[in-house]
Image (cartoon, rainbow, N blue to C red):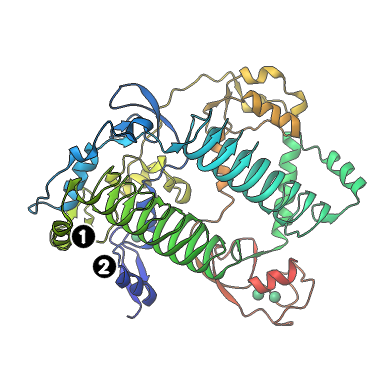
Amino acid sequence: MNIETKICQNCEQSFVIEPEDFTFYEKIKVPPPTWCPECRAIRRMVFWNQSNLYRKKDSRTGEEIFSTYPARADVKIYDHDYWWSDAWDPMEFGMAIDFSRPFLEQLKELNAKVPLPSRSVRGMVNSDYSNQASYLKDCYPCFNGGNAENCLYCVAFQRIKDTMDAYAVLDLELGYELYQAGSSSRCFFSSDVENCRDVWFSRDCVDCSDCFGCVNLRHKRYCIFNEQCTKEDYEKNVKALDRGSHAAVQDIKKKLRELYLRLPHKFLHGLHNVNVSGDYVYNSKNAHDVFEAGELEDVRYSENLATGVKDAYDYTNWGEHSELIYEASSCGDNCRNIKFCFDCWPAMRDSEYCLSCHSSGNLFGCVGLRNKQYCILNKQYTREEYEELLPRIIDHMTAMPYTNQNGRTYRYGEFFPPEFSPLAYNETIAINYYPKAKDAVMASGYLWRDPDEKEYEATMGASDLPDHISDAKDSIIEQVIRCDSCKRAHRILDRELAFYRRFVIPLPRLCHRCRYTARLSIRNPRKSYRRRCECAGKSSENGIYQNTIAHFHKSDPCPNEFETSYAPGRSEIVYCEQCYNAEVV
Ligand SMILES: [Zn+2]
Ligand SMILES: [Zn+2]
Ligand SMILES: [Zn+2]
Ligand SMILES: [Zn+2]
Protein backbone atom coordinates (compact mmCIF):
# COMPACT_ATOMS: atom_id res chain seq x y z
CA MET A 1 0.00 0.00 0.00
CA ASN A 2 1.19 3.49 -0.80
CA ILE A 3 0.95 6.61 1.29
CA GLU A 4 -2.45 8.24 0.78
CA THR A 5 -3.61 11.79 1.42
CA LYS A 6 -7.25 12.16 2.41
CA ILE A 7 -9.55 15.03 3.30
CA CYS A 8 -11.00 14.79 6.80
CA GLN A 9 -14.77 14.39 6.70
CA ASN A 10 -15.04 16.57 9.79
CA CYS A 11 -12.58 19.50 9.54
CA GLU A 12 -11.94 19.22 5.80
CA GLN A 13 -8.16 19.45 6.30
CA SER A 14 -5.91 16.93 4.59
CA PHE A 15 -4.28 14.08 6.49
CA VAL A 16 -2.03 11.25 5.55
CA ILE A 17 -2.44 7.49 5.88
CA GLU A 18 0.88 5.70 5.74
CA PRO A 19 1.63 2.16 4.52
CA GLU A 20 2.07 0.80 8.07
CA ASP A 21 -1.31 2.34 9.00
CA PHE A 22 -2.97 0.41 6.18
CA THR A 23 -1.24 -2.75 7.42
CA PHE A 24 -2.82 -2.25 10.84
CA TYR A 25 -6.29 -1.53 9.41
CA GLU A 26 -6.09 -4.69 7.30
CA LYS A 27 -4.93 -6.74 10.27
CA ILE A 28 -7.92 -5.75 12.39
CA LYS A 29 -10.30 -5.69 9.42
CA VAL A 30 -11.50 -2.09 9.47
CA PRO A 31 -11.74 0.42 6.62
CA PRO A 32 -9.27 3.33 6.75
CA PRO A 33 -10.51 6.35 8.77
CA THR A 34 -12.39 9.26 7.20
CA TRP A 35 -11.56 11.69 10.03
CA CYS A 36 -8.06 13.09 10.64
CA PRO A 37 -6.11 11.97 13.75
CA GLU A 38 -6.90 15.17 15.71
CA CYS A 39 -10.64 15.07 14.96
CA ARG A 40 -10.66 11.37 15.90
CA ALA A 41 -8.89 12.12 19.20
CA ILE A 42 -11.43 14.83 20.09
CA ARG A 43 -14.32 12.54 19.15
CA ARG A 44 -13.03 9.95 21.67
CA MET A 45 -12.22 12.56 24.30
CA VAL A 46 -15.73 14.02 24.52
CA PHE A 47 -16.75 10.79 26.28
CA TRP A 48 -14.11 11.12 29.01
CA ASN A 49 -14.67 13.35 32.00
CA GLN A 50 -11.35 13.10 33.79
CA SER A 51 -11.64 15.64 36.55
CA ASN A 52 -15.18 16.89 37.23
CA LEU A 53 -17.79 15.59 39.59
CA TYR A 54 -21.41 16.73 39.65
CA ARG A 55 -24.56 16.30 41.68
CA LYS A 56 -27.30 14.50 39.81
CA LYS A 57 -30.52 12.68 40.72
CA ASP A 58 -30.37 8.89 40.86
CA SER A 59 -32.93 7.73 38.24
CA ARG A 60 -34.24 5.06 40.61
CA THR A 61 -34.37 6.72 44.02
CA GLY A 62 -34.54 10.38 43.02
CA GLU A 63 -31.83 11.04 45.57
CA GLU A 64 -29.06 13.49 44.66
CA ILE A 65 -25.73 11.68 44.33
CA PHE A 66 -22.22 12.42 43.02
CA SER A 67 -22.05 11.69 39.34
CA THR A 68 -19.75 11.72 36.32
CA TYR A 69 -22.60 13.45 34.49
CA PRO A 70 -24.06 16.87 35.34
CA ALA A 71 -27.68 17.32 36.43
CA ARG A 72 -28.75 18.56 32.99
CA ALA A 73 -27.00 15.76 31.05
CA ASP A 74 -29.55 13.68 29.19
CA VAL A 75 -28.74 10.31 30.74
CA LYS A 76 -30.15 7.99 33.39
CA ILE A 77 -27.85 7.08 36.24
CA TYR A 78 -28.00 4.51 39.02
CA ASP A 79 -25.94 4.73 42.15
CA HIS A 80 -22.67 2.92 41.55
CA ASP A 81 -23.33 0.03 43.99
CA TYR A 82 -26.86 -0.58 42.71
CA TRP A 83 -25.72 -0.42 39.08
CA TRP A 84 -23.22 -3.22 39.74
CA SER A 85 -25.78 -5.38 41.59
CA ASP A 86 -28.05 -8.07 40.14
CA ALA A 87 -31.13 -6.07 41.19
CA TRP A 88 -31.69 -4.88 37.64
CA ASP A 89 -31.08 -6.44 34.24
CA PRO A 90 -29.75 -4.38 31.31
CA MET A 91 -30.94 -7.19 28.97
CA GLU A 92 -34.50 -5.98 29.62
CA PHE A 93 -33.71 -3.05 27.31
CA GLY A 94 -32.78 -5.45 24.47
CA MET A 95 -33.94 -4.58 20.95
CA ALA A 96 -34.26 -6.71 17.79
CA ILE A 97 -32.26 -5.39 14.85
CA ASP A 98 -34.26 -3.52 12.25
CA PHE A 99 -32.53 -3.71 8.89
CA SER A 100 -34.76 -0.95 7.52
CA ARG A 101 -33.02 1.68 9.71
CA PRO A 102 -29.38 2.69 10.29
CA PHE A 103 -27.81 0.52 12.98
CA LEU A 104 -26.27 3.42 14.91
CA GLU A 105 -29.70 5.09 15.12
CA GLN A 106 -30.95 1.99 16.97
CA LEU A 107 -27.86 1.87 19.19
CA LYS A 108 -28.41 5.55 20.02
CA GLU A 109 -31.94 4.70 21.25
CA LEU A 110 -30.65 1.83 23.36
CA ASN A 111 -27.87 4.02 24.75
CA ALA A 112 -30.42 6.63 25.84
CA LYS A 113 -32.48 4.00 27.72
CA VAL A 114 -29.91 1.99 29.69
CA PRO A 115 -28.84 3.64 32.95
CA LEU A 116 -25.13 4.27 33.51
CA PRO A 117 -23.23 3.92 36.79
CA SER A 118 -23.05 7.22 38.67
CA ARG A 119 -19.31 6.92 39.07
CA SER A 120 -16.49 4.47 38.62
CA VAL A 121 -14.92 3.81 42.01
CA ARG A 122 -13.95 0.91 44.25
CA GLY A 123 -12.38 0.45 47.66
CA MET A 124 -12.95 4.02 48.81
CA VAL A 125 -12.57 5.10 52.43
CA ASN A 126 -13.69 8.61 53.35
CA SER A 127 -13.06 9.78 49.79
CA ASP A 128 -16.53 10.22 48.39
CA TYR A 129 -15.73 13.25 46.27
CA SER A 130 -13.61 11.37 43.73
CA ASN A 131 -14.08 9.46 40.50
CA GLN A 132 -12.39 6.88 38.27
CA ALA A 133 -10.46 5.88 41.31
CA SER A 134 -9.69 2.87 43.44
CA TYR A 135 -8.40 2.37 46.95
CA LEU A 136 -8.35 5.97 48.15
CA LYS A 137 -8.34 6.86 51.81
CA ASP A 138 -9.05 10.36 53.13
CA CYS A 139 -8.76 11.97 49.71
CA TYR A 140 -10.75 14.91 48.36
CA PRO A 141 -11.19 15.81 44.69
CA CYS A 142 -8.93 13.10 43.33
CA PHE A 143 -9.51 11.61 39.87
CA ASN A 144 -8.21 8.90 37.62
CA GLY A 145 -5.87 7.15 40.02
CA GLY A 146 -5.42 4.58 42.69
CA ASN A 147 -3.85 3.73 46.02
CA ALA A 148 -3.66 7.13 47.62
CA GLU A 149 -3.91 8.34 51.17
CA ASN A 150 -4.58 11.83 52.47
CA CYS A 151 -4.30 13.57 49.10
CA LEU A 152 -6.07 16.64 47.73
CA TYR A 153 -6.63 17.83 44.15
CA CYS A 154 -4.65 15.09 42.41
CA VAL A 155 -5.33 13.69 38.94
CA ALA A 156 -3.67 10.72 37.19
CA PHE A 157 -1.72 9.07 40.01
CA GLN A 158 -0.72 5.77 41.59
CA ARG A 159 0.62 5.05 45.06
CA ILE A 160 0.81 8.54 46.54
CA LYS A 161 0.53 9.89 50.05
CA ASP A 162 0.10 13.30 51.70
CA THR A 163 0.25 15.07 48.34
CA MET A 164 -1.69 18.05 46.95
CA ASP A 165 -2.10 19.54 43.49
CA ALA A 166 -0.34 16.93 41.40
CA TYR A 167 -0.86 15.53 37.89
CA ALA A 168 0.74 12.37 36.49
CA VAL A 169 2.58 11.23 39.59
CA LEU A 170 3.66 7.81 40.81
CA ASP A 171 5.15 6.57 44.07
CA LEU A 172 5.25 9.89 45.80
CA GLU A 173 4.83 11.37 49.21
CA LEU A 174 4.61 14.90 50.50
CA GLY A 175 4.39 16.61 47.13
CA TYR A 176 2.80 19.88 46.09
CA GLU A 177 2.21 21.51 42.72
CA LEU A 178 3.78 18.79 40.60
CA TYR A 179 3.51 17.73 37.00
CA GLN A 180 5.09 14.36 36.06
CA ALA A 181 6.94 13.12 39.12
CA GLY A 182 7.96 9.66 40.22
CA SER A 183 9.62 7.85 43.14
CA SER A 184 10.11 11.08 45.05
CA SER A 185 9.31 12.74 48.33
CA ARG A 186 9.10 16.33 49.54
CA CYS A 187 9.07 17.86 46.06
CA PHE A 188 7.27 21.15 45.41
CA PHE A 189 6.44 23.37 42.41
CA SER A 190 8.35 21.03 40.08
CA SER A 191 7.91 19.03 36.90
CA ASP A 192 9.67 16.03 35.41
CA VAL A 193 11.38 14.98 38.62
CA GLU A 194 12.38 11.40 39.25
CA ASN A 195 13.94 9.91 42.33
CA CYS A 196 14.25 13.30 44.07
CA ARG A 197 14.06 14.48 47.68
CA ASP A 198 13.54 18.00 49.03
CA VAL A 199 13.46 19.58 45.58
CA TRP A 200 11.77 22.94 44.98
CA PHE A 201 10.89 24.88 41.82
CA SER A 202 12.81 22.53 39.53
CA ARG A 203 12.37 20.94 36.13
CA ASP A 204 13.81 17.80 34.59
CA CYS A 205 15.91 16.61 37.52
CA VAL A 206 16.83 13.01 38.33
CA ASP A 207 18.28 11.64 41.54
CA CYS A 208 18.70 15.04 43.18
CA SER A 209 18.11 16.19 46.71
CA ASP A 210 18.13 19.56 48.40
CA CYS A 211 17.95 21.49 45.14
CA PHE A 212 16.09 24.75 44.49
CA GLY A 213 15.26 26.36 41.13
CA CYS A 214 17.25 23.79 39.14
CA VAL A 215 16.93 22.47 35.58
CA ASN A 216 18.47 19.39 33.88
CA LEU A 217 20.45 18.20 36.92
CA ARG A 218 21.46 14.59 37.60
CA HIS A 219 22.74 13.20 40.92
CA LYS A 220 23.19 16.61 42.54
CA ARG A 221 22.76 17.98 46.05
CA TYR A 222 22.68 21.52 47.44
CA CYS A 223 22.23 23.42 44.17
CA ILE A 224 20.37 26.71 43.74
CA PHE A 225 19.51 27.77 40.18
CA ASN A 226 22.05 25.15 39.02
CA GLU A 227 24.86 26.62 41.15
CA GLN A 228 26.60 24.21 43.48
CA CYS A 229 26.58 25.37 47.13
CA THR A 230 27.93 23.98 50.36
CA LYS A 231 25.30 22.61 52.74
CA GLU A 232 25.59 25.72 54.94
CA ASP A 233 25.31 28.15 52.02
CA TYR A 234 22.41 26.19 50.59
CA GLU A 235 20.40 26.46 53.78
CA LYS A 236 21.21 30.12 54.25
CA ASN A 237 20.45 31.08 50.63
CA VAL A 238 17.22 29.10 50.41
CA LYS A 239 16.01 30.85 53.53
CA ALA A 240 16.81 34.24 51.98
CA LEU A 241 14.69 33.37 48.93
CA ASP A 242 11.68 33.35 51.28
CA ARG A 243 9.39 30.92 49.45
CA GLY A 244 6.60 31.54 51.98
CA SER A 245 5.86 34.87 50.29
CA HIS A 246 3.54 34.92 47.28
CA ALA A 247 5.49 37.81 45.72
CA ALA A 248 8.80 36.00 46.24
CA VAL A 249 7.40 32.85 44.62
CA GLN A 250 6.52 34.85 41.49
CA ASP A 251 10.15 36.04 41.28
CA ILE A 252 11.47 32.51 41.83
CA LYS A 253 9.25 31.17 39.03
CA LYS A 254 10.43 33.94 36.70
CA LYS A 255 14.08 33.15 37.45
CA LEU A 256 13.46 29.45 36.90
CA ARG A 257 11.87 30.18 33.52
CA GLU A 258 14.90 32.28 32.49
CA LEU A 259 17.28 29.46 33.45
CA TYR A 260 15.06 26.93 31.65
CA LEU A 261 15.26 28.92 28.42
CA ARG A 262 19.08 29.09 28.58
CA LEU A 263 19.47 25.28 28.63
CA PRO A 264 18.84 22.58 26.00
CA HIS A 265 15.81 20.27 26.21
CA LYS A 266 15.33 16.85 24.77
CA PHE A 267 12.96 16.79 21.75
CA LEU A 268 10.61 14.54 23.71
CA HIS A 269 9.97 13.99 27.40
CA GLY A 270 10.59 10.35 28.05
CA LEU A 271 12.97 7.56 28.91
CA HIS A 272 13.89 4.06 27.74
CA ASN A 273 12.25 4.31 24.32
CA VAL A 274 13.03 2.82 20.93
CA ASN A 275 11.57 4.48 17.85
CA VAL A 276 8.86 6.66 19.40
CA SER A 277 7.31 10.07 18.79
CA GLY A 278 4.87 12.22 20.74
CA ASP A 279 5.57 13.46 24.27
CA TYR A 280 5.85 12.03 27.76
CA VAL A 281 6.50 8.49 26.57
CA TYR A 282 8.27 5.91 28.68
CA ASN A 283 9.56 2.32 28.17
CA SER A 284 8.01 2.06 24.72
CA LYS A 285 8.87 0.60 21.33
CA ASN A 286 7.49 1.56 17.91
CA ALA A 287 4.99 4.03 19.29
CA HIS A 288 4.17 7.13 17.26
CA ASP A 289 2.08 10.19 17.96
CA VAL A 290 1.50 8.98 21.50
CA PHE A 291 1.19 11.24 24.52
CA GLU A 292 1.47 10.58 28.25
CA ALA A 293 1.96 6.87 27.90
CA GLY A 294 4.19 4.04 29.02
CA GLU A 295 4.97 0.45 28.09
CA LEU A 296 3.58 0.62 24.56
CA GLU A 297 4.51 -1.56 21.62
CA ASP A 298 3.31 -0.92 18.07
CA VAL A 299 0.89 1.85 18.98
CA ARG A 300 -0.10 5.03 17.14
CA TYR A 301 -2.36 8.06 17.65
CA SER A 302 -3.04 7.25 21.30
CA GLU A 303 -2.92 8.96 24.66
CA ASN A 304 -3.02 8.45 28.41
CA LEU A 305 -2.14 4.76 28.38
CA ALA A 306 -0.19 2.79 30.94
CA THR A 307 1.08 -0.62 31.90
CA GLY A 308 1.29 -2.54 28.66
CA VAL A 309 -0.55 -1.89 25.40
CA LYS A 310 0.30 -3.75 22.22
CA ASP A 311 -1.00 -3.35 18.68
CA ALA A 312 -3.30 -0.38 19.12
CA TYR A 313 -4.37 2.71 17.18
CA ASP A 314 -6.60 5.53 18.32
CA TYR A 315 -6.76 4.49 21.93
CA THR A 316 -7.50 7.06 24.64
CA ASN A 317 -7.08 6.37 28.36
CA TRP A 318 -6.21 3.31 30.41
CA GLY A 319 -4.42 0.27 28.91
CA GLU A 320 -3.20 -2.28 31.43
CA HIS A 321 -2.25 -5.33 29.36
CA SER A 322 -4.61 -4.69 26.46
CA GLU A 323 -3.99 -5.51 22.83
CA LEU A 324 -5.57 -5.20 19.41
CA ILE A 325 -7.48 -2.08 20.30
CA TYR A 326 -8.83 0.44 17.81
CA GLU A 327 -10.87 3.59 18.42
CA ALA A 328 -11.48 3.04 22.13
CA SER A 329 -11.88 5.45 25.02
CA SER A 330 -11.52 4.56 28.73
CA CYS A 331 -11.17 0.82 28.15
CA GLY A 332 -8.57 -1.40 29.75
CA ASP A 333 -7.45 -4.15 32.08
CA ASN A 334 -6.76 -7.17 29.87
CA CYS A 335 -8.97 -6.23 26.93
CA ARG A 336 -8.34 -7.90 23.58
CA ASN A 337 -9.63 -7.18 20.11
CA ILE A 338 -12.10 -4.41 20.87
CA LYS A 339 -13.06 -1.66 18.46
CA PHE A 340 -15.26 1.42 18.79
CA CYS A 341 -15.88 0.98 22.52
CA PHE A 342 -16.21 3.28 25.51
CA ASP A 343 -15.85 2.37 29.21
CA CYS A 344 -15.43 -1.37 28.60
CA TRP A 345 -13.35 -3.29 31.13
CA PRO A 346 -12.03 -5.66 32.43
CA ALA A 347 -11.18 -8.47 30.03
CA MET A 348 -13.55 -7.39 27.24
CA ARG A 349 -12.92 -9.54 24.18
CA ASP A 350 -13.85 -9.51 20.50
CA SER A 351 -16.46 -6.76 20.84
CA GLU A 352 -17.42 -3.67 18.89
CA TYR A 353 -19.62 -0.61 19.41
CA CYS A 354 -20.15 -1.24 23.13
CA LEU A 355 -20.58 1.26 25.94
CA SER A 356 -20.03 0.46 29.65
CA CYS A 357 -19.85 -3.32 29.16
CA HIS A 358 -17.73 -5.52 31.37
CA SER A 359 -16.11 -8.98 31.45
CA SER A 360 -17.80 -10.03 28.22
CA GLY A 361 -16.96 -11.30 24.77
CA ASN A 362 -18.58 -11.22 21.34
CA LEU A 363 -20.87 -8.25 21.93
CA PHE A 364 -21.86 -5.87 19.17
CA GLY A 365 -23.69 -2.61 19.87
CA CYS A 366 -24.47 -3.29 23.55
CA VAL A 367 -24.82 -1.02 26.57
CA GLY A 368 -24.22 -1.80 30.24
CA LEU A 369 -23.83 -5.60 29.99
CA ARG A 370 -21.79 -7.78 32.34
CA ASN A 371 -20.57 -11.37 31.82
CA LYS A 372 -22.41 -11.83 28.53
CA GLN A 373 -21.61 -13.45 25.18
CA TYR A 374 -23.14 -13.20 21.71
CA CYS A 375 -25.44 -10.22 22.26
CA ILE A 376 -26.46 -7.51 19.81
CA LEU A 377 -28.37 -4.41 21.02
CA ASN A 378 -28.62 -6.12 24.46
CA LYS A 379 -30.46 -9.12 22.98
CA GLN A 380 -29.17 -12.66 23.38
CA TYR A 381 -28.37 -14.80 20.31
CA THR A 382 -26.82 -18.22 19.90
CA ARG A 383 -23.26 -18.33 18.67
CA GLU A 384 -24.43 -19.47 15.23
CA GLU A 385 -27.02 -16.68 14.97
CA TYR A 386 -24.46 -14.10 16.12
CA GLU A 387 -21.85 -15.20 13.60
CA GLU A 388 -24.40 -15.13 10.83
CA LEU A 389 -25.73 -11.66 11.81
CA LEU A 390 -22.40 -9.91 12.37
CA PRO A 391 -21.24 -9.60 8.72
CA ARG A 392 -24.79 -8.62 7.71
CA ILE A 393 -24.85 -5.78 10.24
CA ILE A 394 -21.40 -4.55 9.18
CA ASP A 395 -22.52 -4.51 5.52
CA HIS A 396 -25.77 -2.83 6.53
CA MET A 397 -23.90 -0.10 8.46
CA THR A 398 -21.97 0.68 5.30
CA ALA A 399 -24.95 0.41 2.94
CA MET A 400 -27.28 2.46 5.16
CA PRO A 401 -25.05 4.82 7.15
CA TYR A 402 -26.13 6.95 10.09
CA THR A 403 -25.99 10.68 9.44
CA ASN A 404 -26.09 13.06 12.38
CA GLN A 405 -27.41 16.60 12.66
CA ASN A 406 -24.02 18.01 11.62
CA GLY A 407 -24.15 16.11 8.36
CA ARG A 408 -21.32 13.71 9.27
CA THR A 409 -21.80 10.24 7.86
CA TYR A 410 -21.04 7.23 10.03
CA ARG A 411 -20.44 3.98 8.18
CA TYR A 412 -18.92 0.93 9.81
CA GLY A 413 -15.42 1.93 10.97
CA GLU A 414 -16.15 5.20 12.79
CA PHE A 415 -16.19 5.75 16.56
CA PHE A 416 -19.49 6.85 18.17
CA PRO A 417 -20.81 10.24 17.07
CA PRO A 418 -20.40 12.91 19.79
CA GLU A 419 -24.17 12.96 20.50
CA PHE A 420 -23.78 9.46 22.01
CA SER A 421 -21.92 11.12 24.89
CA PRO A 422 -24.04 12.74 27.62
CA LEU A 423 -21.17 15.15 28.24
CA ALA A 424 -20.42 18.56 26.76
CA TYR A 425 -17.02 19.35 25.25
CA ASN A 426 -16.08 21.59 28.20
CA GLU A 427 -16.91 18.83 30.71
CA THR A 428 -14.34 16.44 29.23
CA ILE A 429 -10.60 16.35 28.69
CA ALA A 430 -11.16 17.65 25.14
CA ILE A 431 -11.18 21.16 26.65
CA ASN A 432 -7.77 20.53 28.28
CA TYR A 433 -6.03 19.03 25.27
CA TYR A 434 -7.74 21.09 22.60
CA PRO A 435 -8.79 24.30 24.36
CA LYS A 436 -11.43 26.21 22.42
CA ALA A 437 -13.85 29.01 23.20
CA LYS A 438 -17.56 28.27 23.51
CA ASP A 439 -18.39 29.63 20.03
CA ALA A 440 -15.71 27.56 18.32
CA VAL A 441 -16.81 24.42 20.17
CA MET A 442 -20.42 24.88 19.14
CA ALA A 443 -19.46 25.77 15.57
CA SER A 444 -17.58 22.47 15.32
CA GLY A 445 -20.72 20.53 16.27
CA TYR A 446 -19.96 19.77 19.90
CA LEU A 447 -22.11 20.49 22.90
CA TRP A 448 -21.14 23.24 25.36
CA ARG A 449 -22.74 23.54 28.79
CA ASP A 450 -22.16 26.43 31.15
CA PRO A 451 -21.71 25.16 34.71
CA ASP A 452 -24.87 25.42 36.80
CA GLU A 453 -23.34 24.79 40.17
CA LYS A 454 -24.45 26.84 43.15
CA GLU A 455 -22.60 30.15 43.28
CA TYR A 456 -21.33 31.07 46.72
CA GLU A 457 -20.92 34.68 47.73
CA ALA A 458 -17.22 35.42 48.17
CA THR A 459 -16.23 37.06 51.45
CA MET A 460 -12.85 38.21 50.15
CA GLY A 461 -10.80 38.49 46.96
CA ALA A 462 -7.62 36.47 46.40
CA SER A 463 -5.63 39.71 46.37
CA ASP A 464 -6.70 40.31 49.99
CA LEU A 465 -4.91 37.15 51.14
CA PRO A 466 -1.76 37.76 53.22
CA ASP A 467 1.39 37.74 51.10
CA HIS A 468 3.23 35.47 53.55
CA ILE A 469 1.97 32.18 54.91
CA SER A 470 3.23 33.20 58.37
CA ASP A 471 0.58 35.95 58.35
CA ALA A 472 -2.30 33.56 57.53
CA LYS A 473 -4.73 33.40 60.44
CA ASP A 474 -6.62 30.24 61.44
CA SER A 475 -9.83 32.01 60.47
CA ILE A 476 -8.84 31.93 56.79
CA ILE A 477 -10.57 28.54 56.52
CA GLU A 478 -13.89 30.27 57.23
CA GLN A 479 -13.48 32.67 54.31
CA VAL A 480 -14.95 32.19 50.85
CA ILE A 481 -12.26 33.39 48.46
CA ARG A 482 -12.83 34.71 44.95
CA CYS A 483 -10.42 33.03 42.51
CA ASP A 484 -8.08 35.48 40.78
CA SER A 485 -8.73 33.87 37.42
CA CYS A 486 -12.24 32.40 37.06
CA LYS A 487 -13.73 34.63 39.82
CA ARG A 488 -15.60 31.65 41.28
CA ALA A 489 -15.64 31.13 45.02
CA HIS A 490 -13.49 28.58 46.79
CA ARG A 491 -12.29 27.72 50.27
CA ILE A 492 -9.05 26.68 51.91
CA LEU A 493 -9.47 23.48 53.91
CA ASP A 494 -7.97 23.13 57.37
CA ARG A 495 -5.64 20.32 56.33
CA GLU A 496 -4.61 22.36 53.32
CA LEU A 497 -3.69 25.27 55.57
CA ALA A 498 -1.71 22.92 57.83
CA PHE A 499 0.24 21.69 54.77
CA TYR A 500 1.04 25.24 53.60
CA ARG A 501 2.22 26.15 57.09
CA ARG A 502 4.29 22.99 57.56
CA PHE A 503 6.21 23.48 54.30
CA VAL A 504 6.10 27.30 54.26
CA ILE A 505 4.09 27.75 51.05
CA PRO A 506 1.97 30.87 50.40
CA LEU A 507 -1.81 30.52 50.13
CA PRO A 508 -2.82 29.95 46.48
CA ARG A 509 -4.49 32.79 44.59
CA LEU A 510 -6.31 30.45 42.23
CA CYS A 511 -9.06 27.94 42.90
CA HIS A 512 -8.16 24.27 42.49
CA ARG A 513 -9.74 24.08 39.02
CA CYS A 514 -7.68 26.98 37.71
CA ARG A 515 -4.55 25.53 39.37
CA TYR A 516 -5.25 22.27 37.51
CA THR A 517 -5.60 24.08 34.18
CA ALA A 518 -2.40 26.06 34.83
CA ARG A 519 -0.54 22.86 35.74
CA LEU A 520 -1.54 21.20 32.48
CA SER A 521 -0.35 24.19 30.49
CA ILE A 522 3.24 23.07 31.23
CA ARG A 523 2.91 20.47 28.50
CA ASN A 524 3.19 21.22 24.81
CA PRO A 525 0.05 21.09 22.68
CA ARG A 526 -0.53 17.65 21.17
CA LYS A 527 0.94 18.17 17.77
CA SER A 528 4.00 16.79 16.03
CA TYR A 529 6.51 18.74 13.95
CA ARG A 530 9.45 17.52 11.92
CA ARG A 531 12.44 19.53 13.14
CA ARG A 532 16.24 19.50 13.15
CA CYS A 533 18.39 19.42 16.28
CA GLU A 534 19.26 22.96 17.38
CA CYS A 535 22.83 22.05 18.32
CA ALA A 536 25.09 24.12 16.03
CA GLY A 537 28.37 22.42 16.99
CA LYS A 538 29.87 24.34 19.90
CA SER A 539 26.68 26.05 21.00
CA SER A 540 22.96 26.10 20.41
CA GLU A 541 21.83 27.66 17.12
CA ASN A 542 20.67 30.80 18.91
CA GLY A 543 24.08 31.07 20.65
CA ILE A 544 22.53 31.13 24.12
CA TYR A 545 23.80 27.75 25.32
CA GLN A 546 27.51 26.81 25.07
CA ASN A 547 28.09 23.05 24.86
CA THR A 548 30.32 21.72 27.62
CA ILE A 549 31.77 18.78 25.70
CA ALA A 550 32.54 17.81 22.06
CA HIS A 551 29.62 16.07 20.32
CA PHE A 552 29.69 13.29 17.71
CA HIS A 553 29.22 15.86 14.92
CA LYS A 554 32.29 17.87 16.06
CA SER A 555 32.03 21.61 15.23
CA ASP A 556 29.44 21.09 12.46
CA PRO A 557 25.73 21.53 13.13
CA CYS A 558 24.05 18.32 14.32
CA PRO A 559 22.42 16.55 11.35
CA ASN A 560 19.75 14.74 13.41
CA GLU A 561 16.04 15.29 12.77
CA PHE A 562 13.10 14.21 14.84
CA GLU A 563 9.36 14.46 15.38
CA THR A 564 8.70 16.78 18.31
CA SER A 565 5.82 18.52 20.04
CA TYR A 566 7.97 21.69 20.34
CA ALA A 567 6.57 23.84 17.55
CA PRO A 568 9.09 25.67 15.35
CA GLY A 569 9.64 29.18 16.66
CA ARG A 570 9.17 28.28 20.33
CA SER A 571 11.76 29.80 22.63
CA GLU A 572 13.09 26.52 24.09
CA ILE A 573 16.42 25.16 22.79
CA VAL A 574 15.57 21.69 21.45
CA TYR A 575 18.28 19.06 21.11
CA CYS A 576 18.23 15.51 19.76
CA GLU A 577 18.70 12.69 22.26
CA GLN A 578 22.45 12.29 21.50
CA CYS A 579 23.28 15.98 21.95
CA TYR A 580 21.05 16.29 25.01
CA ASN A 581 22.62 13.22 26.62
CA ALA A 582 26.10 14.61 25.92
CA GLU A 583 25.21 17.75 27.90
CA VAL A 584 22.95 16.43 30.64
CA VAL A 585 24.76 13.68 32.51
ZN1 LIG B 1 -10.16 16.64 10.94
ZN1 LIG C 1 -10.57 29.60 39.39
ZN1 LIG D 1 21.79 16.76 17.96
ZN1 LIG E 1 25.33 18.34 19.35
Q: Which residue is mark 1?
A: 411
Q: Which residue is mark 2?
A: 31
- The residue at the point 19 percent across, 53 percent down is 403
The amino acid at mark 1 is: Arg
CA distance separating discs 1 and 2: 10 Å
Image region (quadrant) for ligand 4? bottom right
Name the outermost residue toward the left: 100
- The residue at the point 55 percent across, 61 percent down is 281
Name above or below for residue 553 compared with residue 166. Answer: below
Name above or below for residue 448 compared with residue 392. Answer: above
> Is disc 2 placed on a helix, strand or loop?
loop
- The residue at the point 28 percent across, 31 percent down is 87
The amino acid at mark 2 is: Pro
- The residue at the point 32 percent across, 26 percent down is 58
Q: Nearer the viewer, residue 35 or 368?
A: 368
- Among numbered discs 1 and 2, the one appearing first in the sequence: 2
Residue 304 screen position, x and y as percent: 48, 53
Instruction: Residue 391: name its quadrant.
Output: bottom left
* Quadrant containing the C terminus in the rendered view: bottom right
> Is disc 1 placed on a helix, strand or loop?
loop
Q: Nearer the viewer, residue 349 or 62?
A: 349
Q: Are marks 1 and 2 in contact (CB under 8 Å)?
A: yes
Judge whether residue 70 can be spotted in this image.
Answer: no
The 10 Å Cα crowd at callout 1, few under 14, some 14 to 19, many 20 or more, is many
Residue 448 screen position, x and y as percent: 35, 40
Residue 131 screen position, x and y as percent: 46, 37
Judge whether residue 244 can be spotted in this image.
Answer: yes
